[in-house]
Image (cartoon, helix red, strand yellow):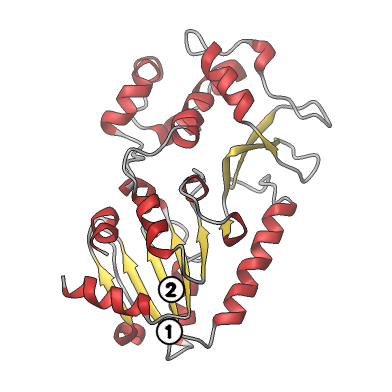
Amino acid sequence: MNEIKKIKSVLENSDALAIGAGAGLSTSAGFTYSGERFEKYFSDFQARYGFSDMYTGGFYPYKTLEEHWAYWSRYIMINRYMDAPIPVYEELFELVKDKNYFVITTNVDHCFQKAGFDKPRLFYTQGDYGLFQCSEPCHQKTYDNEEQIRAMYEAQQDMKIPTELLPKCPVCGKPMSMNLRADDTFVEDEGWHKAALRYEDFLNENKDKNIVYLELGVGGNTPGIIKYPFWNMTYSNPKAKYICINKGEAVVPKEIENQSICVNNDIYEVIKSL
C-alpha cells in the first residue's frame, strides 16, 4: 500500500507523463490468448489444426487464403472490435486524462483509443489489427479493415471465408496482409511517421523536467522500444521518476533504483487503487 501512496504523490507532482505499454496491460484487461478464452472462440480450429493458443494459430501454415482469413478475421474481431472484458484502459484514462501525457505502445489492439485517449498522443509502434496493407508491399499505405473483417467474420463457414471476400491490394491486386510488424514487409505509413515525430517532440520538450516514465506490462520481447529507453532517460535526468507495474516482471537496474518504484502486481488492481 505504501507503493500506491508513493505513486500517487509522484504522479501529482509531475510535469509530464510518458506511458509505455506492453502486452501485460492488455492481459490485465482480459485479452488472454490461451485457455478458456481461446477455447470459447477457437475450439473448432484447435480440433482441426492442433494448436492450443491464438498466437500459434496466427503462424499456422494454412493451405488456402480462405482458411487463413477465416482464422484472422475471427481473431481480429475478438481482439480489436470487441471490448476488453476488464476496464483497465478506461481506469488508466481516468487517472491520466488531465495530465500532460503521451503513450507509446507495442500493443496492436487499439484499446487506448477505444478508452478515450487522445489520438495525437498515441504512438502504436508495431501496427494495428484494424489496418490492412499490401503483402508485398507495393506501396506505403494502410487501409481500415473493419467493414471487411466483419463481413468475413459473419460469412465464414467450416473455417473458410467465401473466395470473393479475400482482401486484395487496390494497387497491384496481390493479397492484403495485416499491418503488424512481423518481418521487413511492415508498412510504416504517413500516420506512423507523424506519431513517431510527435513522441520524439514530447520527449525532447520534457526530458529535463519532472517527468514520470510509467511502464505497464512490458516484457522482455522488445525491450529496446520502451524499457531500455525509459531506463536511460530516467538515468540521464535526476528529476525523472520511473514506475514499473508488471506482475512478476517488475525489475529495475541498480543505477536508477532510488528514482524508481516497482510493483509486482496485476495492473488493473494497482490502477484501481490509484
Q: Which residue is mark 1?
A: 240
Query: Badge 1: few (under 14), some or many (20 or more) residues near its Cα, within 10 Å?
Result: many
Mark 1 secondary-structure assignment: loop
**264 w.r.t. 146: above or below:** below
Q: Which quarter of the figure has residue 37?
A: top left
Q: Quadrant of the N terminus?
A: bottom left
Mark 2 belongs to which amino acid?
A: Tyr
Q: Which residue is mark 2?
A: 213
**47 w.r.t. 39: above or below:** above
**182 w.r.t. 151: above or below:** below
In depth, the one of 65 and 101 nearer the eye is 101
Mark 1 belongs to which amino acid?
A: Ala
Disc 2 vs disc 1: Cβ atoms closer than 8 Å? Answer: yes
Query: Image point 52% across, 49% down: which residue?
Result: 113
Residue 225: x %, y % from top left: 52, 64
- Per the model, the C-alpha gap separating discs 2 and 1 is 8 Å
Mark 2 secondary-structure assignment: strand
Residue 265: x %, y % from top left: 22, 60
Query: Badge 2: few (under 14), some or many (20 or more) residues near its Cα, within 10 Å?
Result: many
Residue 174: x %, y % from top left: 76, 27
Earlier along the polypeptide chain: callout 2 or callout 1? 2
